[in-house]
């Protein structure tokens, strides 16, 4: 009989004291008796011994205690039996391609079924997406099958090479095998065949298993948003992968509703596009009313931030400033021009103060301060109206820089970015020349994004209460002697759009419209509503097509990948050379000898017998 510790069977000797304890009797008295009586007594003693042995065997308490000692001895010896299990005994890393193309015609479901056939005694599971995702590490067959049943394909592009590298790290100590299950139609990163060869050079077996067959598809492969005439427009590109022309019915509107429906002719193997404009704030859906192998790319989402629609107050004594023109181009915003600060500021989200010579009246300063402290935003444009000798002291205190005086330079000064930001990323500082500026110093608590070459701040901001005040030292007044040439550059309107979006907390429109596979780090841990679930994290991989909600913002995520949408690709020839030598190893039911230890079961029976012993003693009235 197989035992882990055969010497522990010596514990069976404990049965002897138990038997002696039950057979122990008081010593007999010595008496003088006739010989005949002795013979009769001897026969009676033999009958008593027989009766005692019979009673001993029939005593249930004795049998229970005897069985307890035997089972404890066998459990201590570690009794086991062996079976042949239809699993590999080595560590197996299962890599499943979870890219968008794996959603075509149940490819991912097929991959899960194939993966179950390769489950071994010890398993790790990696989802190959834009970044490898470890779903299970070094666990048993039962856990692996449970995890496999819950896995779903994403909507990104698989980096198979990185996934294989992750598998190599898991097997670096004990070795094992890697099973890569994919349609192999598209990937990013290094060539997976090269990664396979690298792993095998370290003695790790890598098998490629292909799933899926070529199939037709029509899908949305690209889309972009542009600002035009004060509004946002969206251009959508549709590609027909079939070998015949298609009339594609398209619906657009909000979730669950249709506001526009039309048909677009898309030639075989080619693309066609259409434009939607204007787009109102919120999420607009574009749906292809067509059944094909990959429903994932039949949907597109466009998000226009709700806060993009705002009223801007432009206060100036010069109605021809380029800054006012640039603000009027901001999509979804309405600019109202006043020569003085109005009494009611409740309807405005932003105030731009661009007086050329006449400073803001003293009685308006308190209203402006209250506006900022309750969450409003104010932009001061540097001018002679902000000179200390011209304006109110309380107004000067609101500006994040301290004005000193007016300076003119004949040669001109350039701009230097001192802190990277979205506002300054398209300024083209090398083309800006400043000949007149307001000399100023940064106040304590302010942040400066850009300065002149001599260190004078021209773009600074700080927080006042719940609001933001920004100082722009690049005056844009026209005339024979302009302060600088920034307003003449084509980037000037873009600068204002980025500035207003930033100061209003909106961000760039591209921040609200992402492609699948985008990975971002958040400033803090937040609850995120994805298209299918709610997660709490400080890092987010956008691997689903649909709308995400983060901190009140709605973010549209789309596939937009020509190669992932191309389900007509047949990867058989592509990987044929890489996998042909693996064919003999693609055996799912290799068996291994497994030890089945029953010690835990024996101990469980012992506890039940001890409970029975207590019941017997109690029934006899001895407890």
Image: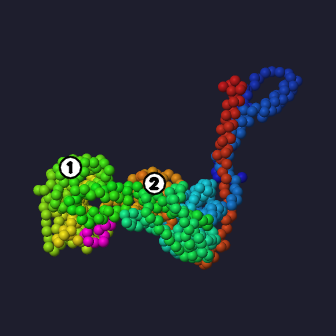
Q: Which residue is mark 2?
A: 549
Q: Nearest the camera: 32 or 437?
A: 437
Q: Which residue is mark 1?
A: 364
Report x, y in % for residue 322.
26, 66
Decide: few, some or many residues near mark 2? Use Cα within 10 Å; few <14, some 14-19, many ≥20.
some
Q: Residue furthest right?
A: 36
Q: Nearest the camera: 541 or 382?
A: 382
Earlier in the chain: of badge 1 and badge 2, it is 1
**Image height check: is 418 above or below 21?**
below
Q: Secondary structure at mark 2?
A: strand
Q: Which mark is nearer the camera, 1 or 2? A: 1
Left or right, 4 with reference to 526: right
Q: Secondary structure at mark 1?
A: helix
Q: Quadrant of residue 103?
A: bottom right
Q: Is residue 128 visible?
A: no
Q: Magenta residues, as a range? A: 486-497
Report x, y in % for residue 120.
63, 61
Report x, y in % for residue 617.
69, 28
Q: Residue at x 78, y 33 (%)?
A: 58
Report x, y in % for residue 263.
56, 68
Residue 259 is a magenta residue: no
Q: Residue at x 42, y 57 (%)?
A: 281
Q: Nearest the camera: 127 or 611?
A: 127
Left or right, 178 with reference to 1: left
Which SS type dominates the magenta stretch? helix
Q: Residue at x 71, y 26 (%)?
A: 619
The numbered disc on residue 571 is: none
Left or right, 592 with reference to 525: right
Residue 494 is a magenta residue: yes
Q: Quadrant of residue 333?
A: bottom left
Decide: few, some or many residues near mark 1? Use Cα within 10 Å; few <14, some 14-19, many ≥20.
some
Where does the C terminus fall, quadrant-wise?
top right
């Amino acid at each position: 009989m197989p035992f882990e510790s055969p010497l522990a069977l010596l514990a069976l000797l404990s049965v002897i004291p138990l038997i002696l304890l039950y057979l122990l009797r008081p010593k007999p008295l010595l008496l003088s008796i006739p010989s005949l009586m002795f013979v009769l007594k001897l026969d009676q003693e033999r009958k008593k011994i027989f009766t005692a042995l019979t009673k001993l065997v029939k005593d249930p308490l004795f049998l229970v205690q005897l069985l307890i000692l035997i089972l404890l001895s066998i459990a201590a010896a570690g009794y086991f039996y062996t079976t042949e299990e239809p699993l590999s005994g080595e560590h197996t890393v299962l890599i499943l391609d979870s890219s968008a193309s794996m959603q075509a015609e149940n490819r991912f479901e097929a991959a899960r079924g194939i993966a179950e056939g390769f489950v071994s005694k010890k398993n790790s599971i990696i989802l190959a997406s834009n970044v490898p995702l470890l779903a299970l590490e070094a666990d048993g067959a039962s856990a692996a099958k449970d995890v496999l049943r819950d896995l779903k394909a994403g909507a990104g592009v698989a980096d198979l090479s990185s996934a294989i590298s992750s598998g190599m790290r898991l097997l670096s100590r004990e070795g094992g095998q890697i099973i890569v299950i994919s349609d192999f139609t598209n990937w990013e990163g290094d060539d997976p065949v090269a990664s396979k060869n690298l792993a095998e050079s370290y003695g790790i077996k890598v098998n490629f298993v292909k799933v899926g067959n070529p199939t037709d598809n029509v899908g949305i492969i690209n889309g972009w948003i542009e600002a035009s005439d004060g509004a946002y427009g969206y251009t959508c590109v549709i590609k027909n992968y079939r070998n015949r022309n298609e009339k594609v019915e398209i619906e657009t509107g909000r979730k669950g509703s249709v506001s526009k429906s039309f048909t677009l002719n898309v030639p075989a193997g080619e693309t066609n596009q259409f434009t939607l404009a204007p787009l109102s704030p919120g999420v607009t859906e574009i749906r292809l009313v067509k059944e094909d192998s990959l429903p994932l790319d039949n949907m597109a989402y466009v998000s226009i931030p709700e806060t993009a629609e705002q009223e801007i107050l432009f206060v100036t004594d010069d109605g021809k400033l380029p800054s006012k023109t640039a603000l009027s181009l901001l999509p979804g915003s309405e600019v109202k021009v006043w020569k003085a600060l109005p009494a009611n500021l409740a309807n405005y989200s932003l105030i731009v103060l661009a007086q050329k010579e006449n400073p803001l009246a003293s009685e308006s300063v308190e209203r402006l301060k209250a506006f900022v402290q309750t969450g409003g935003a104010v932009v001061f444009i540097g001018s002679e109206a902000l000179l200390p000798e011209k304006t109110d002291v309380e107004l000067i205190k609101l500006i994040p820089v301290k004005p000193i005086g007016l300076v003119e330079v004949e040669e001109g000064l350039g701009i230097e970015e001192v802190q990277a930001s979205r506002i300054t990323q398209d300024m083209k500082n090398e083309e800006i020349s400043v000949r007149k500026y307001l000399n100023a110093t940064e106040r304590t608590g302010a942040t400066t994004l850009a300065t002149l070459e001599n260190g004078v701040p021209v773009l600074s901001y700080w927080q006042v209460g719940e609001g933001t005040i920004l100082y722009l030292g690049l005056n844009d007044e026209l005339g024979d002697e302009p302060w600088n040439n920034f307003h003449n550059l084509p980037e000037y309107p873009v600068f204002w759009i980025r500035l207003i979006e930033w100061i209003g907390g909106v961000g760039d429109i591209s921040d609200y419209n992402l492609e699948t596979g985008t990975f971002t780090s958040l400033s803090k841990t937040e609850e995120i509503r994805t298209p299918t679930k709610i997660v709490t994290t400080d890092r987010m991989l956008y691997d689903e097509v649909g709308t995400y909600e983060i901190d009140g913002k709605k973010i549209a995520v789309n596939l937009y990948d020509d190669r992932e949408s191309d389900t007509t690709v047949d990867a058989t020839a592509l990987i044929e050379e890489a996998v042909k030598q693996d064919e003999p190893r693609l055996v799912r039911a290799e068996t291994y000898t497994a030890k089945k230890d029953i010690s835990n079961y024996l101990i469980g029976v012992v506890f039940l017998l001890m409970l029975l012993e207590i019941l017997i003693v109690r029934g006899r009235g001895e407890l």
